[in-house]
Image: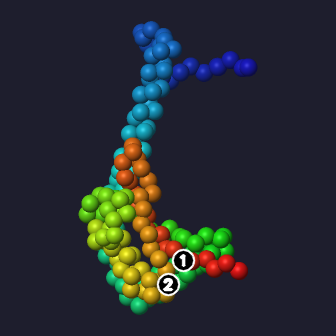
Amino acid sequence: MEALKTKPTAEHALGDETFMSAAELGAYTAELKGAKARQAGDRVDKARAELIERLSEPVELTPKTVHDITQSLLHKLRIAAEQGNNELLVMRFPDVMCSDGGRAINNFEKDWPDTLTGRPRQAFEFWRDRLRPAGYGLKAMIVDWPDGMPGDAGLFLTWETRRV
């Protein structure tokens, strides 16, 4: 192993300080990790707030938008069917997009759709008006449990698999 031949820069020089103990170095490392975690948490909180804002704004359902949604959905449904699945997660959203924080979804109450707001409500209406008549089912469930509390909810399209 080669010895270090350069001197530390002035900002890294110890000056009159005593050398850091292992415990102090461990505390310093923990402090740095905590600061990085807080920064990451701040970014996550900001992204979540932006997502909620975006999901709160309804999508204008023009014929082109409906066509694009339908084509994307058909592609995903084909892939799911080829994999042998009979359900597909079509939307995941924060529980705050439900007027009751996801309680009705979590308790499998029959009126859970009434609690949906924004784009999740539009997704339900899209299913109700266009996909249910084609034989697709829709179920909702809480898919994330941060700190043991309901987090994100998911909407799943379902269909029957025929036995051959």
View extreme (front): residue: 163
Judge by depth and name the residue closer to the eye, 164 or 87.
164
- Name the residue at 34% across, 82% down: 60
View extreme (right): residue: 1
Q: Position of residue 48 (x, y in %)?
A: 36, 56
Q: Is residue 126 above or below residue 119?
A: below
Q: Is residue 132 above or below residue 81?
A: below
- Judge left or right: residue 100 versus residue 78: left
User: Which quadrant: the C terminus?
Assistant: bottom right
- Name the residue at 36% across, 80% down: 125
Calculate the distance from the C-alpha at mark 1 to the C-alpha at mark 2.
7 Å
Local crowd at mark 2 within 10 Å, few (<14), some, or many (≥20)? Answer: few
Q: Residue 85 has which mark?
A: none
Sequence-wise, the earlier of marks 1 and 2 is 2
Is residue 42 visible to the viewer in this orientation of the structure?
Answer: yes
Q: Return the residue at label 1.
A: 159
View extreme (left): residue: 99
Q: Is residue 66 above or below residue 38?
A: below
User: Which quadrant: the N terminus?
Assistant: top right
Q: Quadrant of residue 61?
A: bottom left
Q: Position of residue 99 (x, y in %)?
A: 26, 63
Name which residue type carries label 1. Trp
- Name the residue at 45% across, 57% down: 143
Q: Are marks 1 and 2 in contact (CB under 8 Å)?
A: yes
Q: Is residue 4 above or below residue 142?
A: above
Secondary structure of the residue carrying tag 2 is loop
Q: Return the residue at label 2.
A: 135
Q: Quadrant of residue 142?
A: bottom left
- Judge left or right: residue 118 versus residue 66: left
Local crowd at mark 1 within 10 Å, few (<14), some, or many (≥20)? Answer: some
Name which residue type carries label 2. Gly
Q: Position of residue 46 (x, y in %)?
A: 35, 53
